[in-house]
Amino acid sequence: MVLQDIIPTSLMALSACGAILVAASFLPRATSALPAVYGAAGQAGHMPALEMYRGVLALVVAASHSMAFPLFREDGLLGGLTGLDGRKAVAFFCVISGFVIYRSCCGLGASQEALRSYAIRRALRILPVLFLAIALSLLVTNNVEWPLVASEFSLIGVFGLDSVATANPTLWSIYPEILFYGLAPIIVALSGRNRVAFFLIAASVLAIGDRAAESHAVHVWKYFMLGMAVSALDLSAGGLVSRGTRAAVAVAGASLIAVDLMVGDIIGVVWPVPAEGATEGEGNGLAAVFSIGLGIGCALTVFGTVRSATVNGLAALPVFRWLGSVSYPFFVLHQVVYMSAFGWQFEAPRSFSGEDAVTSFEDPAAALAVILLGTLALATVVHVVVERPFMRLGRRLGRPSTAVPDQVTAASIPA
């Protein structure tokens, strides 16, 4: 059997497994028998709503990346359903990361033992799955030249070099997140007592400063700060906010997100910043994609729902626990499945052109279902075989010899 036959057959087998996992997620007995796959109730990172958001956002990002291929883009129905810019979902990912990582850092202080524990847990949480995704991307695209391999595994993209050659440019958001994880303890230590004000000011300064920037890594940092701001607010005053107030905040946040998705960057309308090569007055740069209004909407939504009994009850359903638990491997691996299904090789640096892709799929709806279900199955295997064992290793190696405040596990996205 030639390679052209093996790949579609493997994808079909994976998608069948994914369909079985989806069906089983609605069967209580199946989910209770497989806690490593679906997660135990009440243990979804201590904040089920955020885990649910991660799972849904990962699906949105994967669906949006289908638009790189004419098979999906030119289809009347799917072209509209999956036309959402996945970078909007990344903004929400970053707010969630800021929210959760603040809780991991706010009690660390300057203790060398605590910082060591934090670093080990973060590294073993993120890097094993990421390195696996990088290795698969290099193999699938047949990019095994030593300079590119060295560039990928050295994580040089962490330094915000958007022009770095890469076998999988969809991993771009993982690099600023890794940098954020490294700097988060320092940022929290510098925030002083008025932490909410500090993070809000930092987000505002970053939002103003990135208006003329054309770097993805620069734009997402304001979202990290907004996430830390609402996390600090939730810890300091969250218990005093009434259920009705939180619901109103969540509605306001969802409304801001909807306005950004339908209308675009409101600030950009008033204060346009032309992208490179754009005509005067034409504000079509990345600032219009990564808007501060979108970030505020995501932050308000998180603050308004993170303690909601209704939302957390929905998030406790097995299907959402499962999506949340596999969201990180799903995020970093979905493009590997696309590249396998379409024989697509990226043209470095960072090209999303899938015009020359060749595939045996003819029906776009069936192809998208196979790819998403297959990725879910692959992500579940990676979660059980790679992610969970390394997380356990991180907790064991990172266990401090002295008492350290409990830390909340966070995943990207992302990263």
Image (tube, grey):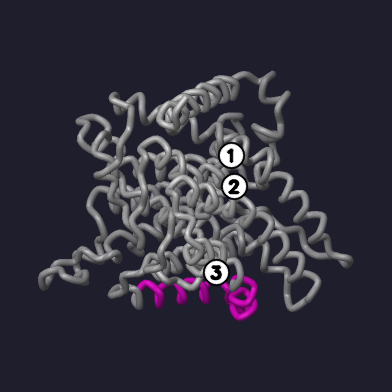
Q: Mark 1–mark 2 contact, CB under 8 Å?
A: yes
The residue indicated by pointer 1 is 312
Q: Is residue 129 magenta?
A: no
* Cα–Cα span, label 3 and label 2: 28 Å
Residue drawn at the location 26% of the way across and 34% of the way down: 71
Residue range in magenta is 184-207
Label of residue 307 in the image: 2
Is residue 149 visible in the rendered structure shown here?
yes
Is residue 197 magenta-colored?
A: yes
Inspect the image, locate mark 1, and give the three-letter code of the amino acid beneath it: Asn
Please give the label number shown on residue 162. none
- Crowd tier of the residue under label 3, counting other residues whose Cα lies within 10 Å: few below 14, some 14–19, many 20 or above: some
Q: Is residue 300 at all visible to an observer of this figure?
A: no
Dot placed on the residue nearer the N-terminal end, 3 or 2: 3
Helix, strand, or loop for circle 2?
loop
Q: Nearer the viewer, mark 3 or mark 2?
A: 3
Mark 2 Cα shell of 10 Å, populated few (<14), some (14-19), many (≥20): some
Mark 1 is surrounded, within 10 Å at the Cα level, by few (under 14), some (14 to 19) or many (20 or more) other residues, namely some
The residue pinned by badge 3 equals: 179
